[in-house]
Amino acid sequence: MTIWRAWEESSCWLQTSVLPTTELCTMTHAKKFGFNSLGVACALLLCLFPSCHSDDQIVTEFRDDGAHLFNNIEVNPSNGIVYVGAVNKVYKLNPNLLTWNAVITGPFPDSIKCLQGECKYEKPLTDNFNKILLVDEDRDWLIVCGSIFQGVCEVKDLNNVSRIVRKQDSQFVAASNATASTVGFLSKGPYQQAVLVVGTTVATHVIDGRIDVSQYWGKIPAVSSRTLNDTASIFDFAVKSPPPSDKGTFVHFQRGGTRYELTYPIEYIYGFTDNDFNYLLTIQRQSLEVGTPYISKIVRFCQSDVEFNSFTEMQLNCGDYPLLQAASVGPLGKELAAKYSMSANAKVLLGVFAKSSSSHSGIPVSDAALCIFKIYDIDKTFNQSHQQCNEGYGSSISWISSLNCYKSVSDSLCKPDFAYLNGTVPISSSPTATFTDTFLTAVAVNSIHNDTVVFLGTRNGTIMKLNINSPTSAYVYDEVVVDAGSPVNSDLNFDPEQQHLYVMTEYKLSKLRVQSCYGHVTCSECLGARDAYCGWCFTDNNSRCSMQGECLAGDWVYYRNSYCAAIDRVEPQHLQVTQKKTLKIYVSNLPAVERAFICVFDVGLRHLETVAVKQEGGSVISCSTPDTDRLIATLVPSLEEEFYTTKLAVRVSGNDVDIVSTNFTFFDCSRYRSCYGCMENNFGCTWCTSTGRCTHNPDQYCEDRADNVHSASSVSVGQHRGSLDCPMIIQTSAEILVASGEYLQLLVGVRNLLPALMTSYDCQFNIDGIITETDAYLNESAETISCESALFQYSRKVDIVKAPFAVVWGIKKLPLDDKNPVDVTVYKCSEMAALCGGCLLLDPKYHCGWCDDGTCNTQKQCLSGPWFDSINGTICANPVITNFSPTSSPLEGETVITIEGSNLGISFDDISPYVTVAEQPCNCSAYRDLYVPASRIVCSTSRVRSITSGDIVVLVRGDSRYVATSTEIFSYVDPQLEGIYPTVGPQSGGTKLTIAGQYLDAGSSVKVFIISQPKDTAGSDSRVEKRQATAVEQSCSVVYQNSSHLICLTSEAKGTGSAIVQVKFDKAVKNLLGIPFEYKQDPYINSTASSLENGKGIGGIPSGGLKVYVQGYNLDIILSPKLRVILGNRDYKSDCVCLNSTLMVCDSPQFPAAAAVLGERPQALEYGFIMDNVFSLLNASSQQEALGKFTLYPDPVVHSFSEVGQIKKYKTDYLAISIDNQCEVCNQEDFFKVWIGQEPCNVSSVAATLINCIPPAVQPGRDTKEQYPDVTVVVGGVRKYVIGYLQYDTEDLLLPIWAIILIVTVGVLLILVIIIVVVKYCMNMSESEKEAKTMRQRFDWIEMQVAAECKDAFAELQTDVTFPSEDVSGFGILFHDYKNYALKVLFPNELNYAVLGDIEVEDETRRPVINKALSQFSQLIDNKTFLLLFVRTLESDKYFTMKDRNVFASYLMVALQGNMEYCTDILKTLLADLIEKSMQGNGNPKVLLRRTESVAEKMLPAWFTFLLYPLLKDHVGQPLYKLCVAIQQVIDLGPMDAITGEAKYSLSEEKLIRVQIDYKSIVSTNCRQSEIITLCVISGLFKTSM
């Protein structure tokens, strides 16, 4: 993470700001030749980091692992610092979204019933939603307003958001709940003071069981202007008139009997300031009446207005899209501004609008539009409305006051005579762009190169980029998925350079490039993308798609006014693969480059290059095709077809980017296997008739050239040309049929035969894989060929087999062409039909008939008995009825019966008048089209007077010899309705209505209707009016039916009230009287909570089982309600139970383990309720934001007992069970169930880490064979944890008598043993004291002896030691120079120092390059960010050994010793990292700096070495040297072991000779005579033992 962040701040910043990745990586790759292997590693790092990929438009991202929902974002325009306001947190981020500072803003104890101080009400922990986040550059302020403490604001330091600069607890500014909207922006106020303009939606809460506003709501106006000047009264109203006036820079809902703040919601979307006015955009109802449509409005008031009398509302229209979702103010490009008759970069208002789900609903749907409004036109319309009011037309804003305009002579816009004007003329604009199935949530605009680019955010986490052509035309040229499935926040912010866009979703902030140039690799792709930021940069070495500012050394081509180079044509257009030719490529708009061109042929995965030459004139390039051997070797795996199309590209030598490209085809004539195929192409192939081969070179491959057939595009000369001249078979009949086992002589037509060449013919048949060949003869006319008779037969049990046929000629058996292949159809009648009726119905072309032996066959193959077919009119014997449905009919008849069987006639007239049901005629004539010969009859029953039953009889052709009688009985019945359940349902329908009764399965068509009660027409004199007063039928779709029950689903009703249930059994109509069904108003849900007491949000775990309490009305009219939670693309459902009409309890659903993959933070999911057809509740959480989200937590983990054998002893009144419960709503006591054996343990409390339960008084029975009962914890009724066993302490007292006697006996014996041991111990102690006294006396004597020896030795040393003189024998102290001193410390074991030698270079011509590379590397080492990243990267490599670290640190100190200040800074940073790592990791801080295991630990002694040299040489060195010589002289005064180094006078206790040794001294003096002096050196002082 450290490397990554350092890289983000340095190299990747360079890449995203200055260079595209390709240039950066090329530059780094070139530099590596001046480095060693470390340079290669650095180059790879530069090129492989993912944030530097040029095709990724998302530069970097920011998330918070604590799962704080993001609310607002602000970017400081002067330095690009990013501020994010989230739930319970505010962040300060650098431009690359690395956290610089963050502060916790919640949750805190709070209650809507009281203020921030003391409160008599309960104050639960409450989340703080960020409502306003604004940067005030003039004061270095960050203004932050939240939802807690009634919506107070505070001012934070812009440089340190943890520091609070100003705070005012008594001024309530923002909405005080999670969902109510708040819009704020900075502006000028009256008297030029700085103000905060705020629009606030009234925040409602559930207070004492009802929906209401806070008692402090009166202090939060709908719109207000707050001062930022006065420290004491900051956030107070900018101007407030003295009492009794209630006016100032604010607007309240009008006071009175009707509480409009509850019934008339106003949602604030956006606000801005322009010139001398402030503007707010809202969504609200058209009027105060409930049920009127929701519309968008714009509010304007003067900045200088001290009483907001200029406060004016106007309707804002965008075609058929009434609901504003987001807005932005920005500039237009020059071309679009001209079409609006505006100057370039003039600002306009852009808004994204949505359609409404219904005419009276404020819920948007996924159909959106973008509209543009000129601020000049907006102001003009406002001014016109003021003028009309001065003339007496218009009225005030209804939610503020109830007055009408009157005539006035005042023409002041900021001090009008009439206040709070409701404008009558709407501000309208036609949609510039519309979107289907798209929900837009954000908009931002920018101008570039005279173009206007708009960025749109969607609900599914996508950014769409639009280029606007005209006021009514735009196109989407790019889409970027930022955070799939998470809505884009309405705050879209550009960085100060306008090069990046900050996009915020629910839990992620992304930095997005405004352009996607780097993802396009060709000029056509670049310009074809129509990205206004991008153009094609032509250069010699690296043509690329880039922004104009990045194309410094080339021609930049823009899509609006230029064209890419293009290939007009290539000569030739295609080529035989075995040929090599020079191609001429005609290119238009060819750029002027200095380097040579090359041609590149993309063949599969390989690129074949050839040299290209630019011809005179500059528009023609010549290049040869690749060598045929290379080309064929590359194409062999791919040339399964007759030709292969490659990409032919022209490039600049040394550049991998195509300048132009086109398709070029290589073909191979020899792969065509027929004359027709050889001719039907444009490659100029020739068919050699004599060899049956297609070739591109007939002179080489054809024997008889006169008989060749040439294609139309061939340059060869011949009389046969085109596919019509090919020798071929012409099929003489549409189909050739033959029964299996029969012989057939075949005659086929032929054309273009060559009698002189073709002398003999044969016919070949492939019958089910077996080749049969017969002789064939060409008739005299040479137009037909006769094949001798052949047997067609196959053994498989299939009805039809196709036998391919061919005519071959000559010795080589060359086939004639068969343009439409001739197949012989071989069939078996017996496989096509098994019954007589089916056999007679076969197509007469097969000549099948019924044989007396009971088989279907041709007449030739029927060897026994008579044979007949459908032509002679014979009827099949033994007609049979196998089944029929339905089995009953109402007495009224007209039940449609379907009768199925066999041999039921072969035509409709055979059975039409001869079908009876229960001795009643059955009408077939109406169902003639449904009759299936021999197998199916459809007819309708007749009406009867009474209940009866009988057989179904079919008399074929009325002949009594051919009668079919059913084996089952058909009945006429009278259905009866007895009751329904349930008796109520929602108006939207979908109720599963169960109808009980008798014979409810009668008839073929059962329909259920719910008919509302007739209106009261008692006051009417007209009988016609009373008859026409019947209500409309609502159908109920039948889903299940048996004899006693019908189940149907109700449809949507037009109103509520009681209704009659009616069932139609074909023509029979039955009404259920006395038990009406009632339509009630659809259920509505007000709130959801995890419990009725605390009212927390709902949630669940993958195992499910959590209770969800739902409050609303009409909940009990739903028979089977379900809770629906959406995870990914799947729905997970659970059942709910209605306790009464206002309360319902649901279990949270279960989620499969694979679908419930959770990170460290819970997931916020959408949810709803399945309540029949009440679709408004299906996605309740997304349509009612007050309901919140469904939070999916990880499963609680129950820990096993930690005691030995997992056996826990039960001693106290409670059993404590350790858990790990991250689920905030899993504190329901009934959610956890604990079982001890077979009995429950009553759960008394649940916490995040503990469950307390009260076990049964007596140890329960055991479920297993273990000694003690097991303890099982059930989570949510699904997941079970067996955590161990419970042992009751009372078991220790329930011992048998023999055990008690045994324990007492053992206890007595133990006491006796203890007594004996104590007596023995006392005796031993007296003996020990005597011995100790003797030992003390002996030690005292030894101590006296040692003291005497020390005294003598000290005296001897005092008298014998001779200190070295000041000049050390006259020559002084010799010091190493600085270079040798440093080298011996840095490289102690080396004799030849590599740093002192020259670099060995094999090729001296490369020495300047290497010297330059080393110089550049030296510059990189002087860069602190690079050097720290370099060291950390090396230390993270597991193959970088301790020896490598020491050597690397020594060389690094050599490189840095010239700048010790910089070296010290680097060492301090590395040591700080080392100390932090040692304190936080698994390392031992005690061994820090004791072992040289890191680069920093090796650098530290080297640093001391460099800095101590002057001190050692000038001050400390001489005393240290004297001390060393003196110590050595003292050691030399006594004996010293030559082998072990031990000495009598050693300072080391380990090297001290502890025995007395007799010795004598020998002094050796060497004298050397020179011309000047005689030098004597004491060369040794020897001691020898006696």
Image (spheres, rainbow, N blue to C red):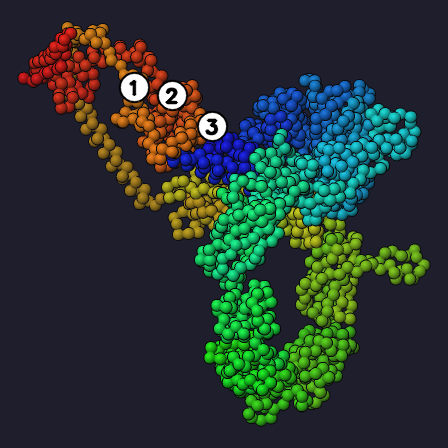
Identified by mark 2, the residue type is: Gln
Residue, disc 1: 1381
Q: Position of residue 1532 (x, y in %)?
A: 15, 14
Residue at left offset 35%, top offset 18%: 1506
Looking at the rendered image, the disc whose residue lies closer to the viewer, 3 or 2, is 2
Disc 2 secondary structure class: loop
- Tell which circle, 3 or 1, labels the residue nearer the N-terminal end: 1
The answer to whether residue 1162 is left or right of residue 185 is: left
Q: Which circle marks residue 1457 in the picture? A: 2
In this rendering, the count of numbered labels is 3
Q: Position of residue 1032 (x, y in %)?
A: 81, 59
Q: Quadrant of residue 1309?
A: top left
Q: Position of residue 22 (x, y in %)?
A: 51, 39
Q: Nearer the viewer, residue 969 or 1301?
A: 969
Q: Position of residue 66 (x, y in %)?
A: 54, 35
Residue, disc 3: 1425
Q: Nearer the viewer, residue 526 or 840?
A: 526
Dot 2 crowding, Cα within 10 Å, few <14, some 14–19, many 20+: some
- The image shows residue 663, relative to residue 788, as above or below, that is above
For this orientation, the residue located farthest to the front is 616
The answer to whether residue 514 is left or right of residue 194 is: left
- Tell which circle, 1 or 2, labels the residue nearer the N-terminal end: 1
Q: Quadrant of the C terminus?
A: top left
Residue at left offset 28%, top offset 25%: 1388
The answer to whether residue 918 is left or right of residue 764 is: right
Disc 1 secondary structure class: helix
